[in-house]
Image: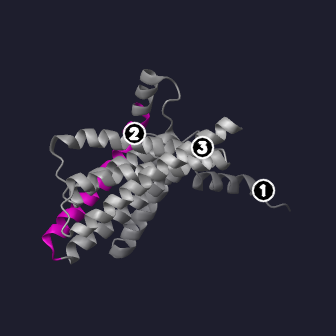
Amino acid sequence: MTLPATDGFWDKVLALLTYDASSPLIFSSGLFLFLFAGFLLVYSAFRRAPMARIVYVIAFSLYFYYKSSGIYFLLLVFAAASDFLIARGIFRTRSKSLKRWLMVLSVAVNLGMLGYFKYTNFFIDISNQLFGQGFLQFRNIFLPVVSLAAFFFVKRLMHLHMGRLAIPAAIYCFFLSLMLSKSTQYMALCPGLASGWIGFGGIAFFISDFTIIFLYFYKFRKPENRGKIHYLNLATYYYGILAFDISILYFAAF
């Protein structure tokens, strides 16, 4: 007497539990209808256990997003966790201003993720058509987008009154971050003395130019703090110039 082979069965189970990029799970597929029918049967069995229902729904939701999007289901986990923690902070704090800024943070996180993953490729395609293929790439655009979101968040958090200069400053911040992304990427991909000076020079210029917004648009309560920011601005500016000059001399010599 021989036992039936189970290799095919376990292969099907493994395929059911893993993500397939060539065939992601979608609402209109027969597999989704089959899984959803099973979900309803188990869900009805937990009608007297509310906590078990909640855990079960969360687990099935994560499974569905994993089957449909792969590793990107972690974005759902991040968004849910950040909203939960922020909402908890809003509930516990008594400061109205802190409640307002926590709300701004929640909106910035969610809209920032939506804008980045929905419109980044569109923006890259338009830029490459205008300025040539390869002008922007996905790995180069990540830091500028994050820096742009951080710029507006810092502007609101620190009460930086820029008026009509806010949009030009944001555009400059984007291209400044693009320069930082290019220089640090070159330092990482082409290790060497010259690329190291270029990378550190880009970092120094970014810090120098970013501190300018505090020198011109922030009201310091203590004058000595303004002086410290001014020294930081000048020190990083001249260090950036020195770093780029050394890299140029290195390339000229070798």
Point 60% across, 43% down: residue: 247
The part of the chain drawn in magenta is: 94-122
Labels 2, 1: front one: 2
Amino acid on which the number 1 mark rests in the picture: Ala
The answer to which of 67 and 235 lies nearer the viewer is 235
**Residue 129 found in image quarter:** top left
| Residue 237 position (above or below residue 41) | above
- How far, Cα to Cα, is label 2 from label 1? 61 Å
Q: Secondary structure at mark 2?
A: helix
Q: Amino acid at mark 2?
A: Phe
Q: Position of residue 18 (x, y in %)?
A: 60, 53
Say what secondary structure mark 1 lies in: loop
- The disc at residue 247 is 3
Q: Between 52 and 40, which is closer to the camera in this rendering?
A: 52
Total numbered labels placed on residues in the image:
3
Q: Which residue is mark 1?
A: 5
Task: Find out whether residue 25 is within the magenta segment.
Answer: no
Q: Is residue 249 left or right of residue 224?
A: right
Q: Earlier in the sequence, mark 2 or mark 1?
A: 1
Q: CA distance from mark 3 to mark 1?
A: 66 Å
Classify 10 Å Cα crowding around label 1: few (below 14), some (14-19), many (20 and above). Answer: few
> Residue at (52%, 25%) from the top-left corner?
133
Residue 69 seen: no
Q: Estimate how packed mark 2 is, as few (under 14), some (14 to 19) or many (20 or more) residues with alpha carbons within 10 Å.
A: some
Relative to 245, 53 lies left or right: left
Is residue 117 found left or right of 1 in the rendered image? Answer: left
